[in-house]
Amino acid sequence: MTSAPPSPARARQRGVTAVLVTLMLTGLMGMAALAVDLGVLYAGKTAAQTAADAAALAGAFTFLTPSNSQPTTAVNAAIALAGANAILGEPVTIAAGDVSVDTTDRLVTVTVPRTGADGIPAFFLRIFGTTETDVVATATAQASPVATGSICLRPIFIPNTVLSTETPTQACADGQTILDANGNLSPWIQANPQLLGSLITLRPTSPGGSLAPSQFYSLDFSNGSGGGASLYSCALSSPLASCGVSPIVAACGSSYQTENGNMVGPTQSGINNLIGATPDTYVAPGAYQHPDGTITDTSPQLVVAPVWDDCCPGCQVGPGGGTITIIGFSNWFIDGLTNGGGNPGVAANFINAAGCGAGGGGNGGGIATNASFGIPVQLVNPN
């Protein structure tokens, strides 16, 4: 028995169904293609932004070494760091024109473009005529000219006149200070770049090097609550938080009591723990040689110490001690202990400094969270 042929109406229904299924499959394939290509595009955009952020930070970081020639050093550092990144397996390539440097405000802006024939390649969207998609990422970073606080302070206060060979009174009169009244590196420092990197005894232990009887440029981070020598030794080698100091941020304008005594043993212990058994070697500001022979711009021996205004008539420290108010932050490379027999001092190279703004207040800047530098380097406009 043979079946009857389908009616014309049913045949038309089958034809419509086939068309609808084809259209649905085409739409689903298009959405799948769009999802795949959008995923690739998002990954490319994220990688480009990462490269821009890192390059901008690298450029801004060069401002921590005042002897660097700007804007050339910042541009070169940004280009080199961008090239260490990749976008979907392809190395990032930027030119000098992609890096903008504001030397006055110490801002570095980096643009990472993947456009035109170098754009992010499309896959399924090629069937719609799209072969590449443009991606542009931009980031701005700043090495702030001032700081408001540091989490990496050491318990050694630095006289503002420490680099001068004159008496403090005469040095103050002649402007031979680290920071000027506006919190900037003083004109004297800027006119004498050889002072950057100069090696001095930062913290003596010999009675002949004391500021006053029993005063050896040391801070009591316990603010008189009884931390003593153990807290002082710990703070020489570790950040504030690691030693239980609270608050963990030493802010501009905050004050600390001085620590009495030359504390030879705690000083030796703290410095030896800081530099370790195989210390780095100072080469130049921003260049420190590691035991394996490599030279980088960072080192565990870079520390931050508060600057004290010894030009202030009412801020002097006598035999009975006193308080030190932070007017800025100075960066030092701890070379080690001097050959002082039973009274070795702390030998250090001066690297840089940042003030708290006019009058020593907490104007501008930011908290320095970048390891051992008192000058904050941060992304200020990531896009």
Image (cartoon, rainbow, N blue to C red):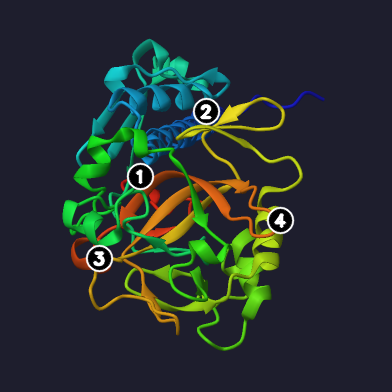
Determine whether the residue tagged by mark 3 lies in a helix, strand or loop.
Answer: loop
Assess whether mark 1 and mark 4 are in contact (beta carbons under 8 angstroms).
Answer: no
Residues at marks 3 and 4, CA–CA distance in whole angstroms: 33 Å
Q: Which element carries disc 1, helix, strand or loop?
A: loop
State the CA–CA distance, disc 1 to disc 2.
30 Å
Disc 1 crowd rating (10 Å Cα; few below 14, some 14-19, many 20+) is some
Type of the residue with mark 3: Cys
Cα–Cα span, label 1 and label 3: 41 Å
Q: Which mark is residue 33?
A: 2
Identified at 48% across, 30% down, the residue is: 44
Residue corresponding to mark 4: 273
Mark 4 is on which residue type?
Answer: Asn
Quarter occupied by residue 261 = bottom right
Residue highlighted by disc 1: 382
Of mark 1 and mark 3, the one earlier in the sequence is 3
Question: How many C-alpha atoms fall within 10 Å of the one at disc 4: few (<14), some, or many (≥20)?
Answer: some
Q: Residue at x 39, y 34 (%)?
A: 62
